[in-house]
């Protein structure tokens, strides 16, 4: 029973983390057709900044991760302005810059902190007990934070003016520009938002599991796969697909041992793709 | 009959683009296919050349059923076409556009191409010669090394025709060849099309611009996917339905 | 046609140049090959030879990527195919005891077959779907290799691949160089023949290409088949050279680096992948004393290209050649430059 509860939380937490990172990636991809290969590094660095702030500077964990998110959000603005905007339309160049930044950030972290895996300390100590089952507050709080963030982002994209502008740009960039939307401003905002979310996810995952300089690459792939599976252009699809992928990743290790369990979600994905190339929710013809 | 279309229908979801269209083209003719915008003319071309299959109906070319054949097969069988949006090989030069389009005749197999066989070299030499001839026919020989995307619009259109001729077609489908041309370019194009016909190519032209009627042996009028009239240019020009179809929507310059 | 005039040399040149500029096109490549052949006689450091051997194998991989890219398709799992070649070859030699030469060629063929199967499924869909499918497949392949237990060595990789010949660096240098020259010749012919032209035609407009009789599906599959064969060859060769392989060399980032090799070298030029691979591997190696910081050099090269160079390094070279020709023509009073 204990394991079922643990697995359940695993599903929820992994899913929400995947979705948080994938959303940031999807914003740029849907709006501007930008494949931001630096996004994984942003996630990773965000986690390390949080770690550094907590352990080296001694700031309260909650405040630390918030600061980390803000720092990476600012970095996101920098990325959009100096790495992506100058090359609008030149897909190859943007991909190259992304790779370059990825390398720079990974190398920097490697050089400063080494490849030893570290973990963020728990945000909350203690366990919740009901009946025979106990769940750490850590787990609960991570899940709650993740869920709250998702709700906030969801609300932002659908109900606020900027969020709706983001949607408009995703659907028809020229039309949006002609109707007075400042594509540059909204893009910068989207990149900042996406980076901030990724940084938060980095901290949370770093606390839940571990930090490593290579976690960015792994997460980037997950985000890319997620966005494609959800169907290019569909934000809502990311939520559902993220849940499925998180579910697979959480449940498979329980049922199968070792590396096989890592392989299973991807084999499933490949099969799905061969049957239905458009992904689950794509609106592309 | 070189080309025979029977009861051709194409539905896209709820929209019927072509409805029970029946027509034919005889060898050596120049047939005009006219009609207002959105009447289904380009769809018809796409159906004939196999870009997508029809919902119903049959297309017979040179005695063969080509209804569901793929575009490259249709090209091999002898139908060449231009595109309304004048698609070209933008990064190739003018000459390359024409020589790259010469796949059908003379034909080299993959083996020939890779291993540079004697047949391949012979074919390539003939293609090089003939490409230059086609460019001369259409007045493009001075631009042969220009990149296609750098050509002025009228010349790009001519290049489209050159490209189609490079496939040694028996039937040439021209999709709005006069679009966006100035009067001297139009005259030149009409002459070139006539010359092509004289050299043995049958031509089916979709056109908006009524000047095409002077060149056609026969005209078919299409509106809302249906054939509404067919006959000599003069008859069609005076037909009531045709006039209303055009004035109801748009009308080309007469 | 020039080949009939110049006999064997002319025939060779004619085989290569589709535009009949004959021997002049061969000068630089031949000079480069001569230089490379001479290097082991002059260079003593085994480590430097090792780096060059690595470069040779990766150049083959980069060229194979280009063969697919010119058709307008983007195999986002290309490094994983290199992995298929590496593991198939390595496992065949290690577990089946096949002679290494056979393993390597067999692995290349095996990789080609997989490439054909995948390409066939996607041949009639838009190139976008092929890109996405390749991405997923690439990731799946890496995971499957990781899950292979003892057979593939799992996460720690496959080791103990039996060595070839005397396993000396100098022997391997010439073997790798030989493979590179053969592959480059084969791929150059592929691209410069009408096959290559047809692929480039498809890449520009698949509608027009079909309308002139080019079977898009057939050519797309062909491009992937050829690209897969050579990347499998590179992977298997490299696996036998180093003796130990791990999946971390064949993941998505590895594919991205293959693309970087092609892009940095210049995407419009056959020699681009060659130049790009040399630059992106050799220059950081020169700075290897920076140790952990040496990847900054690689990133720096990327940034240099992105922010300052529109046509890649091969494009820069062409510019220089054109300038020299123009200068020469001016000197001799010849008004018409080449």
Image: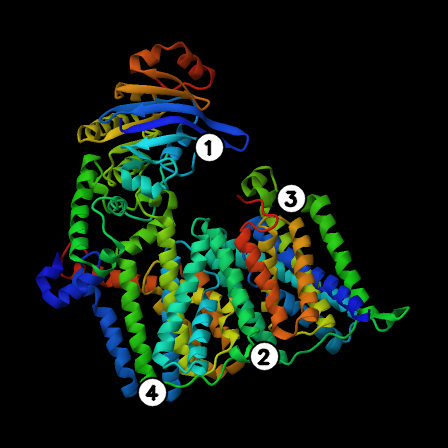
Report the Cα–Cα distance between label 4 and label 2. Answer: 40 Å
Q: Which numbered disc, 3 or 4, marks the residue closer to the eye?
A: 4
Q: Is residue C315 left or right of residue B36?
A: left
Q: Distance between the Cα atoms at labels 2 and 3? A: 40 Å
Q: Chain of mark 2?
A: A
Determine which quarter of the picture holds residue A106.
bottom right
Q: Do the dots labelled 1 and 3 sit on one chain?
A: no
Q: Quadrant of residue B30?
A: top left
Badge nearest the viewer, 4 or 1: 1
Tell whether B230 sits left or right of B223: left
Q: Report whether mark 4 lies on the same chain as mark 2.
A: no
Nearest to the eye among marks 2 and 1: give it: 1
Report the coloring of the rendering.
rainbow
Q: How far apart are labels 2 and 1 at the CA level?
A: 64 Å
Q: Quadrant of the C terminus of chain C?
A: bottom left
Chain letter for the residue marked with disc 4 in the picture: C
Q: Are marks 2 and 3 in contact (CB under 8 Å)?
A: no
Q: Are marks 4 and 1 on the same chain?
A: no
- Per the image, label 2 sits on a secondary structure element best described as helix
Instruction: State the residue in front, C156 or A186.
Output: C156
Residue annotated with mark 4: C165
> Which residue is nearer to you in this view: A147 or B69?
B69
Q: Is residue C188 above or below residue A54?
A: above
**Are dots 2 and 1 on a single chain?**
no
User: Residue A165: which numbered mark, if any?
Assistant: 3
Give residue C309's quadrant in the image. bottom left
Whether residue B38 can be seen here: no
- The residue at which mark 1 appears reads as B55
């Amino acid at each position: 029973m204990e394991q079922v509860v643990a697995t359940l939380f695993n599903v929820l937490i992994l899913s929400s983390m995947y979705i948080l990172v994938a959303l940031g990636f999807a914003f740029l991809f849907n709006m501007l057709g930008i494949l931001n290969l630096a996004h994984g590094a942003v996630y990773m660095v965000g986690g390390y900044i949080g770690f550094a702030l907590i352990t080296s500077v001694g700031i309260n964990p909650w405040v630390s991760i918030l600061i980390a998110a803000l720092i990476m959000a600012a970095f996101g603005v920098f990325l959009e302005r100096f790495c992506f905007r100058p090359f609008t339309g030149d897909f190859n160049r943007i991909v190259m810059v992304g790779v370059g930044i990825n390398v720079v950030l990974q190398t920097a972290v490697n050089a400063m902190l080494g490849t030893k895996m570290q973990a963020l300390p728990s945000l909350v100590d203690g366990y919740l007990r009901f009946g025979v089952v106990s769940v750490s507050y850590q787990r609960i709080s991570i899940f709650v934070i993740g869920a709250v963030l998702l709700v906030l982002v969801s609300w932002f994209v659908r109900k606020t003016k900027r969020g709706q502008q983001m949607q408009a740009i995703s659907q028809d960039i020229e039309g949006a520009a002609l109707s007075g939307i400042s594509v540059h401003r909204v893009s910068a905002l989207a990149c900042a938002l996406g980076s901030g979310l990724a940084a938060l996810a980095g901290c949370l995952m770093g606390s839940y599991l571990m930090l490593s300089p290579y976690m960015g690459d792994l997460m980037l792939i997950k985000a890319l796969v997620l966005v494609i599976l959800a169907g290019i252009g569909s934000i809502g699809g990311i939520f559902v697909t993220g849940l499925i992928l998180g579910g697979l990743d959480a449940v498979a290790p329980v049922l199968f041992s070792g590396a096989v369990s890592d392989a299973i979600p991807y084999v499933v994905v490949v099969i799905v793709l061969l049957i239905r190339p458009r992904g689950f929710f794509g609106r592309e013809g | 009959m070189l080309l025979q279309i029977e009861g051709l229908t194409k539905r896209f979801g709820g929209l019927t683009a072509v409805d029970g269209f029946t027509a034919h083209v005889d060898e050596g003719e120049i047939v005009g296919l006219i009609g207002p915008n959105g009447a289904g003319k380009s769809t018809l071309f796409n159906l004939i050349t196999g870009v997508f299959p029809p919902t119903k109906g049959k297309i017979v070319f040179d005695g063969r059923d080509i209804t569901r054949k793929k575009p490259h097969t249709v090209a091999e069988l002898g139908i060449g076409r231009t595109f309304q949006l004048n698609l070209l090989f933008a990064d190739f030069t003018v000459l390359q556009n024409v020589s790259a389009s010469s796949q059908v005749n003379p034909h080299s197999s993959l083996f020939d191409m890779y291993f540079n066989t004697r047949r391949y070299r012979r074919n390539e030499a003939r293609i090089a010669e003939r490409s230059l001839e086609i460019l001369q026919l259409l007045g493009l020989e001075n631009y042969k090394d220009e990149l296609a995307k750098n050509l002025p619009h009228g010349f790009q259109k001519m290049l489209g025709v050159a490209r189609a001729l490079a496939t040694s077609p028996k039937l040439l489908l021209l999709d709005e060849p006069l679009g966006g041309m100035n009067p001297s370019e139009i005259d030149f194009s009409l002459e070139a099309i006539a010359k092509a016909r004289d050299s043995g190519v049958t031509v089916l032209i979709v056109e908006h611009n009524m000047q095409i009627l002077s060149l056609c042996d026969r005209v078919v009028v299409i509106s809302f996917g249906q054939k509404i009239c067919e006959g000599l240019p003069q008859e069609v020009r005076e037909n009531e339905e045709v006039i209303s179809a055009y004035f109801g929507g748009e009308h080309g310059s007469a | 046609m020039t080949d009939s005039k110049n006999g064997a040399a002319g025939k060779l040149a004619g085989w290569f140049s589709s535009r009949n500029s004959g021997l002049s096109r061969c000068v630089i490549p031949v000079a480069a090959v001569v230089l490379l052949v001479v290097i082991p006689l002059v260079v003593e450091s085994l480590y430097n030879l090792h780096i060059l051997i690595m470069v040779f194998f990766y150049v083959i991989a980069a060229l194979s990527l280009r063969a697919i890219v010119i058709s307008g398709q983007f195999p986002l799992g290309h490094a994983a195919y290199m992995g298929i070649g590496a593991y198939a070859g390595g496992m065949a030699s290690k577990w089946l005891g096949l002679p290494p030469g056979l393993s390597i060629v067999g692995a290349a063929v095996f990789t080609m077959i997989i490439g054909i199967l995948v390409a066939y499924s996607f041949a009639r869909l838009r190139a976008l779907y092929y890109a996405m499918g390749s991405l997923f497949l690439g990731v799946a392949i890496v995971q499957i290799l990781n899950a292979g237990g003892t057979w593939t060595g799992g996460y720690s990789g496959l080791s103990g691949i039996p060595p070839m010949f005397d396993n000396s660096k100098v022997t391997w240098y010439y073997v790798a160089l030989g493979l590179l020259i053969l592959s480059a010749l084969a791929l150059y012919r592929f691209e410069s023949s009408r096959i290559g032209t047809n692929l480039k035609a498809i890449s520009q407009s698949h509608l027009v290409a079909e309308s002139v009789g080019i079977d898009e599906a057939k050519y797309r599959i062909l491009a992937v088949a050829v690209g897969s064969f050579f990347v499998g060859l590179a992977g298997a060769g490299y696996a036998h050279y180093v003796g130990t392989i791990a999946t971390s060399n064949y993941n998505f980032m590895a594919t991205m680096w293959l693309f970087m090799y092609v892009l940095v070298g210049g995407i419009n030029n056959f020699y681009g992948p060659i130049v790009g691979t040399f630059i992106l591997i050799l220059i950081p190696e020169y700075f290897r004393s920076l140790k952990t910081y040496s990847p900054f050099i690689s990133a720096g090269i990327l940034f240099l290209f992105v922010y300052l160079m529109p046509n890649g390094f091969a494009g820069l070279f062409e510019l220089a050649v054109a300038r020299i020709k123009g200068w020469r023509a001016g000197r001799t009073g010849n008004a018409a430059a080449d």
